[in-house]
Amino acid sequence: MNKKLKNAGLLFLFFFLTSAVFAQSANAVAVSLITLDDDQETVRVSIKTSESFIVGANRYVLHIGGRHFLMNEHPEGSLSEIVFFVPLSDYETLKDQSRIILVYGFYHDNTLKDGEGDQSSDFLGKHWSLGKFTKQTLTSK
Amino acid sequence: MKLRLIQFIGILLLSGASFAQTPDPGEPGVYAVSSDEYDFGDEAFGPPTFPDLVEVTGSVHYPTDLTDGPFPVILILHGRHSTCYNGGGGTSIAWPCTGSFSAIPSYRGYNYLAEQLASHGYIVISVSANSISSTDNSTPDYGMRARGELLQHHLDLWNDWNDVGGDPFGDLFVGKLDMDNIGTMGHSRGGEGVIEHALYNRELGSPYGINAVLTLAPVDFNRPILNNIPIMNIAPYCDGDVSDLQGVHFYDDARYIDDSDTTPKHNLMMLGANHNFFNTVWTPGEFPAGTADDWRFVDGTQSDEHCGTSSPDNGRFDAETQRNSLLAYGSAFFRVYIGGETEFDPILKVEDVTPPVSSTLDGSEIFMSYHPGNDKRVDVNRTDSEDTEDTNTLGEAASENGLVIYDICGDDFGEQYCIGAGAGSAQEPHNKNGGVAVLGLSQLEIEWNSADDWYRNDIPSFMEDFTNFDAVQFRASVNFDTSTPDVDLNFTVELTDNTGASSVVAVEDYSEALYFPPGDFGTTLPRTMHNTVSIPVEDFAGIDLTNVSYIRFLFNDSGNGGILVSDLIVSSDEPVVFPPIAAFEANVTETCTGEVVFTDNSAFTPTEWSWIFGDGGTSDEPNPTYFYASNGTYTVALTVTNEAGDDISVETAYIVVDRPEAPVGTGDEICGEGDVVVSAVGSGAGVLNWYDAEEGGTLLDAGTDYTEYVTETKDYWVEESVPNDVLSVGPPDNTFGSGSFFGANDLRGLFFNAYSPFILESVRVYADGGGDRNIQILDGDGGAVIHSVVVDIPNGESVVDLNLPIDVYSGYYMKITGGLVDLFRINDGSPEYPYEIPGIVALTGSNVADTPLDFYYFFFDWKIREPDCLSPRVIVTATVEAGFPVTISDNVTIASGETTTLEATGGITYSWSPTTGLSDPDAAITDANPTETTTYTCSITNDDDCMVSAEVTVTIDGQIGVDERAQTNFEIHPNPSKGIVQIQLGELTDLDKIEVYTTDGKLVFSQEYQNQIENLTLDLSGLATGVYYVKLSNDEFEYQEKLVLQ
């Protein structure tokens, strides 16, 4: 898959989710597509919502398994889409079946949700569960 | 309604306390106010650290009558918010706004505060930062430095308008701004922005006087620390955006990091405030788009019993109340530290806890923390390490009786939080780790269940006179995890004098800080927030306040409860200077190397240090490294001095030095110069190392002897390095419990403490597949990386050689990082921490939250070795006796191809080196015809076999970098010449090229030939007069001849 990404340049991949609903809202939030940026070193993970992402002081954090990503943008200022920048080297290490969680706010505890220790508490902060990351669900456009 | 009732009771209780009548800082001032705006465009400035151009837009509020100027300046920066809106209520975060969208004027949202301050004689500027908000999430620092750069750009503009005027204000403000007296306020991301601006202004040499910084519901993503400027952070308890109230770190982080910081710090907690209502443009009903009650971000249904507006009897402030509170307290802050109106001091110093009437709040709704500058407080107990459970910051005893919990928490990465399982980090704002590896607040957790329980700090005799102070202060928060829900707490504070007389006051008579934190929303509320309790010293009646023995908290009011405590101090309104209290420690107290690193731990800021190490050695450095040469037991003394006096600390028989015996060295002796061989005999247990200095120096070689060519007497030092035994620590293998290969991420590892230096030689691992793995040792989970090595670990069991030097430190964290982990770990609770070698190392646990002792990660069977023991160095001398008189030719310069004669005298044998160009290199006299400048050394030996050497340099003038021939095969006519020369080639008719060089080798003429020729004419009249070389060449020969042009 990664080799295909590199060779294809800008290759669009759809990401099918097992769950794609607001945790606290009736409106959907879902991973839209994953592309390799023109620099060939950055994977752009696009997440869209049918309403509006919060614009405030805090940060959106994308957790995929035990990894988290912070750098993002709203393309053309649209509050219905947020794109996270994931270094390709990090993307390649993501584990199958990892949970994808979008959180408004960075919480240290959230970086340790890897199945170790007490899992009685869920992710902290306002968050949305966006399904699981599995290579089987990735297909080329 | 319950909370309101408690508040009312609190007011009644507090009404009995006697407070000075403090004026209301929130009342409007006497100046009529005018306002204006300026706008240089949406893309008018390029902050150096930001990828996009930003707008230069702002507003100004000022006294209409400017004749009293220059006026102090307040500069306001808003936070991140939607940047554009349209008529339909739609918003975006694009910049610039396009089409039907217009810019959202967030900078106008503080007009109410600007008008208020301007009425008191301030020029208040509020600037727009929409462009930074638009794309700051794609920059590593979230645009914080860019915000600082933008503010500095606005100040530069105002500085010009103040100096010479200019558009758009003409000369209105010329001479009207005091650019040396500026306060800044930043809201939300603007909060960290104004901290960053103050640091940036300082980096630029402080062109403007930033004298007060207010952070309003700020983020603190990057954990910058601002010292030496008064700061106040405002933390809204119901902030649903920065819902972990991380801005309190600005206060906590700055308290003890700079011993020269004499400026105060404040933290104001507003119990019913949210994030947005401080800005009218962000407030529903006051702007047409983009507004929100941000508590909804956390609690979508507004159901929380305290912060949720849908909950009956909630504790929320409405927007007007929230703004009133900022008007009162923000004005107090700026009017004290910018305006010098010290009559408002009691509000900021927690001497008057009754809120100003203008705030429309009561004392149960707003809480101030106050950390005096270093010169106006004495720290009794900073609660900053486990040691302070037993010994307070004054070096006296700290103790307790009967407490259920008495524990320092938050002080290391293994115990980052103070509240147990189930609590979200947003419930502990002081400890929340925002992704930057910096610890939060170290605090003392106390839980009691008996009226006999107490916590005590003894006072040293030098500060027993408490009449030097105005107040006993501490910060506290009710621990909602160990206290009865919804029950406020109380305890008493006791001062006891040295006669045994005691005086007791109740905390509730001075503060309502021991409220049970309200709210019940999941992992966000309730939350802890330390608030200052300040008790006037004079209220401790009936004891000798000049002779205080100890401070004690008596938990004899509330039957049980839990609190978190920090910053137990005594404070004064006037500077208090005490002589230093000497204290120090060494990195080791037993050493077989002789090297000891001493650290000064003295209190009250010494300015001079005098160390006596017990063996005759001394130092005046604050933290010296000392080498003990001889074995023995040494008493160490440190005398520290400051302007108020001095103090000495003596540690008797403190350092035990047990070094290997020094080796026995044997020198060498030669005459003149030559090889010397020095040797030594050691114990045989170690390696002999040769150095060129008694301490430090360069390691020359290792072995029983050392050889070097010398020309004069030289000293060497030799020591024996004796390796220590290899020791084992940790489980020897992975069979002691059950587990599996872990590869989910790179976030797991082990904590360990190093009590003395050692080498971590190897660990045993079990890999699920071979490959390169990155092993790291950090100063805590998420801390700075100290060691990082990549090792190729094979599949299965293997021993990984590391050989990492480990210094003394508590809280090391060792992990595998990167893409490949897949190593075996134990996860069944069978580890039995600590695994330790007393005095050297202890493996203390894993980084799994709540159950850290149930897991053992990756690294089994540690092999460690303490550093090699080092004998004292002994000096070994190679003696070179004087030689005999010799002579040698003077330095000489010859033309290329010429020959000179070199001669040496005084000996019986001679040896010239190098031999290149010499006719007889083993004779006293030799011809020299070097092709390049050469320095010849002649070694001359006399009949006593003593050797000396002498040098002579033969310089070649006219070297052109070719092999010259003793005899050329062509002729140049005429020579000297005016420029036209005939060259008779003789047998060189098949030449390929003629070149002409200057005497310093520069090519000035070149001509190539294809066919055979016999003679030719060259026109060199274009060349300057002087000496040249003409070179003829082909593949087989190179010849040259000198030519003189006249």
Image (cartoon, coloured by chain):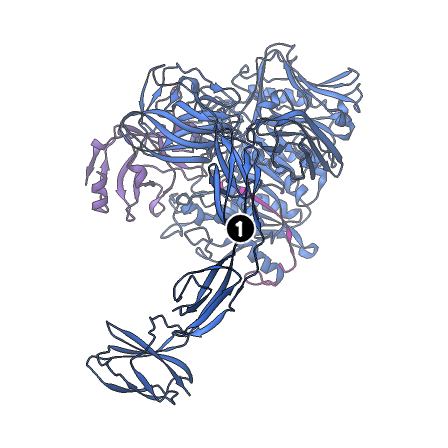
Residue B661 image-quadrant placement: top right
Q: Quadrant of the N terminus of chain A?
A: top left
Check disc 1: other Cα within 10 Å, few if <14, some if 14-19, many if 20+: many
Q: Which x, y percent locates residue B169?
A: 57, 60
**Letter of the chain in purple:** A
Q: Which x, y percent locates residue A138?
A: 21, 35
Instruction: Say which residue appears at 42% left-offset and 32% top-offset.
Output: B803
Instruction: Say which residue appears at 66% left-offset and 12% top-offset.
Output: B556
Residue B292 image-quadrant placement: top left
Q: Which x, y percent locates residue B357?
A: 66, 33
Q: Is residue B100 left or right of residue B417?
A: left
User: What residue sits right under mark 1 in the picture?
Assistant: B151
Q: Does the segment drawn in magenta span residue B178?
A: yes
Q: Amino acid at mark 1?
A: Leu
Residue B219 seen:
no
Q: Quadrant of the C terminus of chain A?
A: top left
Q: Is residue B624 left or right of residue B151?
A: right
Q: Is residue B536 left or right of residue A40?
A: right
Residue B936 seen:
yes
In front here: B77 or B1038? B1038
Q: Is residue B728 left or right of residue B207?
A: left
Answer above or below: position of B354 versus B730: below
Answer above or below: position of B852 versus B619: above
Residue B155 image-quadrant placement: bottom right
Q: Which residues are magenta?
A: B164-190
In front here: B37 or B760? B760
What colour do you see for chain B?
blue
Q: Which x, y percent locates residue B573?
A: 73, 35
- Callout count: 1
